[in-house]
Amino acid sequence: MVISKKHLTSAAVILIAMLLVVLKFRHYLVNPWTRDGQVRADVVQITPRVSGQVVQLAVKNNQLVTKGDLLFQIDPRSFEAALAQARAQLDATGDSYLAEEKKVRAAEAQVREARAAVQQARSAVRALDAEIVKAAAELERQRQLLPQRATSRRLLEAAKASFEYATQQKKGAEAQVAEALAAQEQAEAGFEEVTAALGALGAQNPSIRAARAAVQQAELNLEYTSVTAPVSGYVTNVDLRLGDQAVANHAEMAMVNTESYWVDAFFRETFLSKITAGDRAIVTLMAYPDQPIQGYVESIGWGISQQNGAAGTDLLPNVSPTFEWIRLAQRVPVRIQLEDVPEEIILRVGITGSVLIKSGSAERSKDAPAPTP
């Protein structure tokens, strides 16, 4: 049987096609690939810190803004008035503090005077004690000299009178000490009372600190009336109009951070053993099929939500029925960090694409971070 050249050519083409199919399938098995990739980015909710009427809307929907640009302005007049009131209250508190501080100084001076009076009264008692000792000695000497006729009765009576006078004077001085001690206690009690009413001295005084804190809060509230962009990116979902009432802690718009794009690729769990943090990745977006983007595996998700076991009726676990001969592989998110995105490619949150991981390329990647477990 003679084989013609035409048959040989056909056989060669078939073999080459089969070989290409085998190589492609092997490449698919060695290098994990998925069509379930999605562009993600940090989305910041723009939430005002204070409530008020919007008097200026500086952006439009889907507008590109730079960090620090004004987004919208809340009517600042009521907050300016609140700031002026807080500053006036701070001034009044300062005046009140100065008045109370003067009372403290006066009470402190009274305490010093009372303590000095106590010391003076005690010094007088000590002086009279010495005078009494001296008068008693003289009286005893006169009594001893009288039988000997070495003195007169007049001198004895005079010595006795001096002793009695000194003793009487001591009683008066002791009474003055008691009065001075009572005045000192009263002065100290008054000093403690005005000191407690005033509180800490200087900048640490509670009333002054509270007034200053009120001023700072009023200044912050006035600053919060200008809502600015916290990051650079695109403003989206603007549901705010001029004249609307902005509500504190209620999101009014969203911002897509253009400096935070990444791709979440969902790979079957059977591929995870071939993926390592740092592996090179090729992302082909559906919107730009002819412009692949280079990247690397930044991290691999550590868990996904459980569909079975959630509480159902009567708090019993809710378990979905499955076919024993069909077992679907779970998909785990793998985060891909993009590198050198071409200028003509416009990334948008939510657009999809395919992702190919070059298994085992982590060691050859220079720009990728060190693999993490």
Image (cartoon, rainbow, N blue to C red):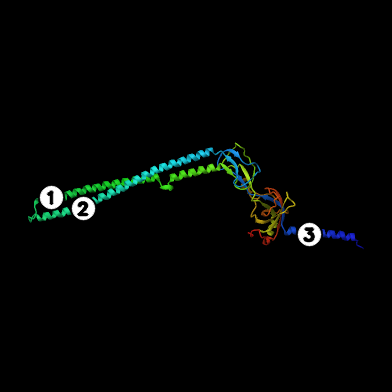
Q: Is residue 180 visible?
A: yes
Amino acid type of the residue that numbered disc 3 sits on in the rendered structure: Val
Q: Which residue is mark 3?
A: 22
Dot 2 falls on a residue whose secondary structure is: helix
Residue drawn at (80%, 60%), measured in percent from left and top? 19
Q: Which residue is mark 2?
A: 129
Neighbour tally class for label 3: few under 14, some 14-19, many 20 plus, Cα within 10 Å: few
Picture coordinates of residue 115, whole percent (x, y): 30, 49
Farthest residue toward the right?
1
Q: CA distance from mark 2 to mark 3?
A: 125 Å
Residue drawn at (43%, 42%), measured in percent from left and top? 93
Q: Residue 33's quadrant in the figure? A: bottom right
Q: Which residue is mark 1?
A: 158
Amino acid type of the residue that numbered disc 1 sits on in the rendered structure: Ala
Dot 3 falls on a residue whose secondary structure is: helix
Neighbour tally class for label 2: few under 14, some 14-19, many 20 plus, Cα within 10 Å: some
For the C terminus, the image quarter is bottom right
Compared across the picture, whether 307 is left or right of 205 comes to right
**Against 350, is 271 above or below?**
below
Q: Nearer the viewer, residue 80 or 251?
A: 80
